[in-house]
Amino acid sequence: MSADRPRIALLATGGTIAGAAASRTATGYQAGVIGPQALLAAVPELADVADVQAEQLFAIDSKNMSDALMLQLARRASELLAESGVAGLVITHGTDTLEESAYLLHLLLKSAKPVVFTGAMRPGNALSTDGPANLYQAACVAASPAAAGLGVLVVMNGAIWSARDVGKQDAAALHAFGSPHGPLGRLAGSSPRFYRAPSRAHTLHSQFSLQRLHALPPVGIVSAWAGMSAAPYEALAASGARGIVHAGFGAATVPDHLLPTLRSLRARGLPIVRASRTGAGPLPCTSDLQEGGLLADDQNPLQARLLLALGLAHGADTAGLQELFMRY
């Protein structure tokens, strides 16, 4: 290890960044087939930034990510961050569920060291693949003292996002990720420049703990559509869901004909959180809260699901669950 460069851990989980296609112009590809050493070899410039120790945790298409795998990722990340010689952590991840894994770690990890997720929208052997540049920039951020204490970050296409509010917003473009609040910063060459910081609790200031968390209780999401029925809610309840997120229209509204179903489910002890299917914007308080309902703040349905699951796993009551959405 060089005395002039920090040591960065790289935790590989597969995804498009580790994918390969039959040709440089093919649209189909297999995710997760390129190992972390090959990812590093494609970016020799990393040697100017940090000494990188690489490890393969998973080799999956991130569409196959699960709550159990996300918790396994969180535990291994926590172990690496606890090593005194590790200055920061880069996690390569498929973009389909990257925002979910990043958000969960944002709430669970107990470290001020930089943790940076990155991925790619094009496989490693595609024309103009974006993976090498994203990996290089992620390492630059993870090696920067300026990134310490900001919680889990996502670096894609030159922008630095907070895991608290980032989401995948485009199916194909290189600028696929965005946030209603904008990026925390951007990279100027190899130099990260930050312009804002997360104000909501995370990492060291989070009340959640990996030590007491063996599994996430099952929580489902039902997205609203015009003329929807109560069947998805009843099916989730029958399948053993411990909570449901209602991804409602606009300001998380609920059709009148569904109100009796939601009241009945709440009366049976099933917490229901209303979030907006738009994925952005603070939600106004309504009379639903007085009836024991729960309301997200500006968390999108994916974030609301994870936050509700963590709250349930830690034994929060209705009032405690509502407070989580205003604190995180």
Image (cartoon, rainbow, N blue to C red):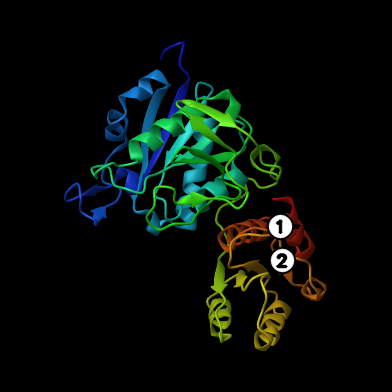
Q: Which mark is residue 325?
A: 1
**Residue 281, above or below 12:** below
Q: Which mark is residue 241?
A: none
Residue 258 or residue 243, whichever sits in front: 258
Residue 256 or residue 314, whichever sits in front: 256
Q: Which residue lies furthest to the bottom in this view?
A: 257
* Cβ atoms at labels 2 and 1 below 8 Å apart: yes
* Number of dots carrying numbers: 2
Residue 151 or residue 155, whichever sits in front: 155
Residue 2 picture quarter: top left
**Residue at which label 2 appears:** 295
Q: Residue type at mark 1?
A: Phe
Horizontal and vertical percent for residue 96?
A: 42, 55
Horizontal and vertical percent for residue 292?
A: 78, 73
Horizontal and vertical percent for residue 279?
A: 59, 61
Observer able to see residue 113 = no
Disc 2 from disc 1: Cα separation: 7 Å
Q: Residue type at mark 2?
A: Leu
Q: Is mark 1 on a helix, strand or loop?
A: helix
Classed neighbour count for the residue bearing mark 1: other residues with Cα under 10 Å, few (<14), some (14–19), many (≥20): many
Counting residues from the N terminus, which is met first, the one under dot 2 or under dot 1?
Answer: 2
Observer able to see residue 145 = yes
Residue at image point 47% right, 45% down: 73
Horizontal and vertical percent for residue 259?
A: 69, 84
**Residue 50, above or below 236:** above
Classed neighbour count for the residue bearing mark 2: other residues with Cα under 10 Å, few (<14), some (14–19), many (≥20): many
Q: What is the quadrant of the N terminus in the image? A: top left
Residue 322 picture quarter: bottom right
Q: Is mark 2 on a helix, strand or loop?
A: strand
Residue at image point 60% right, 39% down: 184
Q: Residue furthest top?
A: 3
